[in-house]
Amino acid sequence: MKRRRIALPANIGPRLAVAMALLTLLLGIALAIGLMAGSQRVQLSELFRDPFSRALFFRLRLPRVTMALLTGASLAVAGAALQALFRNPLAEPYTLGVSGGGALGASIAIALGWSAQLAGIPLLFVASFAGALVSVALVRAMARSGMFVIQGALLLSGVVVNLVCSAAVLTIQYVVEPNSALQILRWILGSLDVIGFATVWRMAVLLAPAWLAILALSRQLHLLAIDQDTAATLGVNVRRCETAVHLLCSLMVGVTVAAGGSIGFVGLIVPHAVRLMFGEDLRIVLPGSLLLGGAFLVLADAVARTALPSGELPVGAITGLMGGPAFLWLLRRRQQYAVL
Amino acid sequence: MEARDVRFSYGGGAPAVRGISLRIADGSMTAIIGANGSGKSTLIRLLTGLLAPQSGAVQLEGKLLGQWEPRARARRIAYVPQTMLLAFPFPAIDVVLSGRTPHVGSFRLESAADRVKALEALDTVGAAHLAERYVTALSGGERQMVMLARALAQEPRLLLLDEPSAALDLKHRAALIRTLVRLRAERGLSVVMVTHDLQLTSTAFDRILALRCGEIAAEGAPAEVLERERLIEIYGDPGVQALRVGSQTVVWTEL
C-alpha cells in the first residue's frame, strides 16, 4: 500500500522522557527556592553549626515545603484525572465542589472535637475524605443523564455544591466556640503552616499509594479523555475506572484539604500548563501534573511567605489570584469549541 | 456474531429493542435501516457490548459478549459511533493511535510499528493529510474519517458503524463504501452499518435488516427489502417510491 510521507510529532516514549526530565529539574529548582526563601533565609552552610538555623530548617521549612509538594502534586494530578474522566477542561477539585465537600467534612470534625485517630489516620482526614466523596458523587449524579454527563450541569452542580458547603462551614463557624471557629477559618483560607513531620508523614502514607494508583490508570484516562464510548470499546471498564478515580481523587483532595485547607485552582492551572508544554496525552499529563503541581505550590508558598514585608499571605489567595484568570481564559477558549 | 431474542429498554421505559435475533456471518455486509427511534442505534450498541441486553443474549464466537476479556473483545470488534464530542484538542494521529490499545501490552506504550499502522489506517480512509490536525478543528465529515481510521487501526474482524456516512459528502461517502468492500475482500472483515442512505445499501450490502418500533420489520437481500410496499411499512410514509435502476434501487419520497 502506498503511504504518503508526512512529518509526525515525536513518539510518546521520547516525549514522556523529555517531559519527566524537564519537570523533575523544575521541581528540584522549586524545592531549592522553597527551602531557602522566607522571612528567615536559610543558608546550607549554617545548618551544620547554627542550632537555630537547623531547627528552623528541619522543624519548619522542610516540613512546610514537603507539605506544599504533597498538596500541590495531589491537587494537580486529581485535577488532570477529573478533567479526563468528565471530558471537561474546566473540571478540577475546586470547581467540582470536591474541595468544598472536604472542607465541610473537616469543619464538622473540628466542630465536634474529633482529634482521635483511626489506625494511625486522624479522624479529620477521614471526615474530609468522606465529605469530598459525597460531593463528587452528588455532582456526578446531578450532571448525569442516562449514559451521558451534561457538561454545563457538571460545573453548575460543582458551583452549587461549593456554595452550599461554604454556607454550611460558615454556619458551623458561627455556632461553635471561638477557638474552633478560628481553626475552621484556617481551612477556608488555605495554609501550609506546619510544625514537624507528624502530619506530613501521615499525608505521604495516604497520598503516595493514591498517586501510584492514579498513574496506573493513565492509559484508561487517556482513552476516556478522547471519548467514553471509544474507551469502552477499546477495552476500558468505564464504571470501574470512574469509581476508582472518584475514590482516589476524593482521598487525595480530602487529605490535602484536611491538612492544608481548601487551596483552589492548582488542579486547573497545572494540568493545562503541562498540556501546553507537552501535548494532550494523559500518560504525560498525569505524571507531569504530579511534578509540576508540587513545584507550583512550593513556589506559590514561597511567594506567600515573602510577598509581604511582615507576616505572610494565605497560599490559597496566591493560587486563587492566578487560577481565576486562568479559568476565564480557558472558558473563553472552550467556547470556541462550543461543547460546553 | 449472533444475537438471540435481545431486549432492551432505557430506564424502565418502553422497550427500544424487542426480541431481535440475528446472525452476522464472517465477511458479510449488513445494513440496519429504519425510521428515527426504531432502535437501530440501541441494537448496534448491544452488539458492541456498550449496552447489556436485559433479556436474550449476544454471542461472539460462541461466547457471551459480557464474558469476553475486554481487550480480547476489542481485538475482534471495533465500533464507530454516530458522533464524538471532543473536549481536548488531540492530534488526529493520537486518536487513531488509540485504536492500537488492544494490541499493546499493559503498562506499555505504542511502538513505532503501531504508529505506522495508525498512519496506514488514516491513509486507507483517505485522511492521511489530517494526521497532525487537531480533531477539535476538523469538520464533522473529517472527524468521521478519523473515527473510522481509529476503528481500522484496531484491526477488527467485525466493524460496527452507526451512521458513519451522515456527515460525509458524496465523494467521501463513496470512498467509505469502497474501503469497506475492499477490506472485506482483503481481510474478510464483517461489517454492520446503521444508515439512512438506502441507495447506498442497495449496492454494497449483502443483507438489510429493517427495524420498526424495536422489532425486525423486514430482513433479506437489498432487492427484497427495498420494495415500495415494504418501505412504506418500515417508514410509515405512503409517499415512499422505489425504482430499480440496474443493480441499484433509487428511493425517494413524494412531497
Image (cartoon, rainbow, N blue to C red):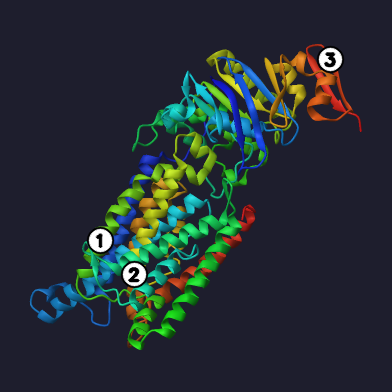
Q: Quadrant of the N terminus of chain B?
A: top right
Q: Position of residue B105 (x, y in %)?
A: 35, 32
Q: Which label is found at residue B244?
A: 3
Q: Is residue A184 above or below residue B194?
A: below
Q: Is residue B164 above or below residue A100?
A: above
In this view, which residue lies farthest toward the top? B246
Q: Chain of mark 2?
A: A
Quarter residue B2 falls in: top right
Give the crowd class for mark 1: few <14, some 14-19, many >=20 residues within 10 Å. some
Identify the residue shown where x is 89% and y is 28%: B239
Instruction: Tell me the amino acid under the disc marked 1.
Output: Ala
Residue bearing the label numbered 1: A204
Identify the residue shown where x is 77% and y is 13%: B223
Q: Are marks 1 and 3 on the same chain?
A: no
Q: Are marks 2 and 3 on the same chain?
A: no
Instruction: Tell me the amino acid under the disc marked 3.
Output: Arg
Q: Which label is found at residue B65?
A: none
Identify the residue shown where x is 57% and y is 15%: B25
Q: Chain of mark 3?
A: B
The answer to whether residue A4 is visible is: no
Q: Is residue B103 left or right of residue B175?
A: left
- Distance, label 2 to label 3, CA atoms, is 73 Å
In depth, the one of B33 and B140 nearer the eye is B33
Identify the residue shown where x is 48% and y is 44%: A224
Q: Chain of mark 1?
A: A
Q: Is residue A188 above or below residue A209?
A: below
Q: Is residue B195 left or right of residue A77?
A: right
Give the crowd class for mark 3: few <14, some 14-19, many >=20 residues within 10 Å. few
Residue bearing the label numbered 2: A258
Earlier sequence position, callout 1 versus callout 2: 1
In this view, which residue lies farthest toward the right? B255
